[in-house]
Structure formats: C-alpha cells, structure tokens
Amino acid sequence: MFDFFDVLIPFLLIHIIFDFYLQSNQWVEAKKKYTYRSTELYFHSLLHGVGLLIPAVALGIDWRSTAFLVATIAVSHFIIDLWKVRARNGDKFSYFIIDQTLHVSVLTVIAFHMANGVTIDTLLQHEKFSDGVMVVFAYLLILKPTSIVIGCVLKKYPISSTSNDTSNSGLIAGGELIGYLERALILTFTLVGSYAAVGFVLAAKSIFRFGELNKSNDRSMTEYVLIGSLISVVITTLVGTLMSLGLNVTIK
C-alpha cells in the first residue's frame, strides 16, 4: 500500500504530459472530425494508460494492479474524450473543465483505492481539512457572490445618460472576468501574507484603466469604475484578512 499523494501526484503528472504536451493539434482536430472512427482517439487513450506504467514501476505496484490501472485509465479516457468531441459545444470552456475534472476524478479514485489507510473518515478528521474548507469558501465567496453585491451597489449609481461613447464597450462580460481574476489574485496574496503583491495588482489595473478613462470625458464613467473597483478590493481584502486570522487561530 502507498501514501495517497505519493500515488496521485505522479498520476497527475503523467496526465498533464500526455494530455497537453504529447497531443498535437492535428490529433485534436481528427478526434473532432471522426469521433469514434478516429485512430488518434484510440491511440491517445492507449498512450494515457501505457504512460502510467512509468509511475507504477517506480512505485513498485504489482502487475495485477498495474494491468488494472492501465486498462481503467485507457478505457475511461476514451469514453470521456469521446463524449467531449461528440458534444455540440465541446469547444466551450465549460466542457474543458468538465472533461479535465472527470479525468482527474478517475485518477483520484484509483489513488484513493491504492493508498494505505486512507478513508473518507480520516480525510474529514484530518487537522487541515477545516482549513481547506475555509480557503475554498473564501474563493467561492469572492467570485460570483461578490460580483452580485458589486452589481447591486452600482445600480444605485447609474452612468450618466449623456454618455454615448461606445468605443470602449470592450469584451462581453470582460469586466466580470477581470474582476474574478483580480479578486482571486488579491485573496491569494492576502492569504500568503504578500501584501506588497496586492499593491502591485492594484497599480497594474490602475495603469490600464487610466488609459481607458482618460479617453472618456464622462465623469460618471470614471466614478462608476472607481466605485466598482474599490468595492471589489475592500470585500476581497476583508475576506482574506478574516480568513488569515481564522487560519492562524486554527493552526495555534
């Protein structure tokens, strides 16, 4: 039997190498075009299974478990990839996330099965489990819920109707995505105590925003963007600080 992470990490490493670095764009296009008739799909899935022979041999896994591992990964990878290439909107980012989540889940279940003395109860009772839940909660809180709060506040401060400039409309939902990335970075830097990096993120965003707002003669647009940015920063900083205090108390 083996330690859970000693098994999972090499498995994930092989997955990343074979799924991203050893799969050409020609293979991807062939899978989309021919689906289950694509030889690239079969070869790619088989390579994933065979590739796991490397960590299996290195870890000293017995041949029965190794054969089961290779077969399970090859078959599961084929089924998941076939589903994705046959999906109508398989190229969408959401399908990519689902695809990778399924692959990683299969590897996690296998590593969990091979691990020594790992059960659901031991994971739930682990001293770091509550810390992990707090961190995940913090990231979930500063994404969609925070965007909704910012949107509700900004409704009270509508942009002046005299502004008819549409040249800076930007990407659809681009502002929301920028906000997600900004808050994720700020929260990460806050949790690790790198407050100087938080200042760098704010400065970088200010530089890019300054060029956009400098072209606008509408003061309400400037105030609108400034209010949204400050609310975003304040909420994320508060969440990060409270989580940092909570984690320190838990560790002590």
Image (cartoon, grey):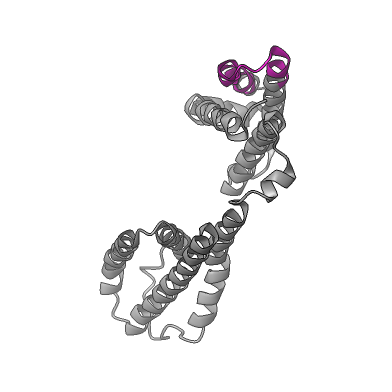
- Residue 194 visible in the snapshot: yes
Left or right: residue 238 versus residue 82 is: left
Q: How many marks?
A: 0
- From which residue to which does the magenta span run? 43-68
Query: Is residue 171 among what the camera can see?
Result: no
Classified by dominant secondary structure, the portion drawn in magenta counts as helix
Residue at screen point 44% across, 76% down: 231
Coordinates of residue 209 in the picture (x, y in percent): 31, 68
The picture places residue 59, in percent across and down from the top left corner, at 58, 20
Relative depth, front residue between 9 and 130: 130
The relative height of residue 71 versus residue 150 in the rendered view (above or below) is: above
| Location of residue 46 in the rendering, given as x and y in whole percent from the top left corner | 64, 19
Q: Residue at x 64, y 21 (%)?
A: 49
Give the vertical position of 37 relative to 194 (above or below): above
Check the image and report above or below for 7 versus 156.
above
Q: Nearer the viewer, residue 98 or 158?
A: 98
- Magenta includes 148? no
- Residue at image point 36% right, 81% down: 223
Q: Is residue 52 located in the magenta-colored stretch of the structure? A: yes
| Quadrant of the rendering where the N terminus is positioned | top right
Please, which residue is most extreme toward the top here?
63
Tell me the quarter of the picture where residue 148 sits: bottom right
Q: Nearer the viewer, residue 96 or 109?
A: 109
Task: Point out residue 78 in the picture as x, y percentages from the top left corner.
Answer: 68, 27
Q: Quadrant of residue 62?
A: top right
219 in relation to 137, above or below:
below
Q: Residue at x 35, y 58 (%)?
A: 194
Taking the image as shown, residue 18 lies to the left or right of residue 230, namely right
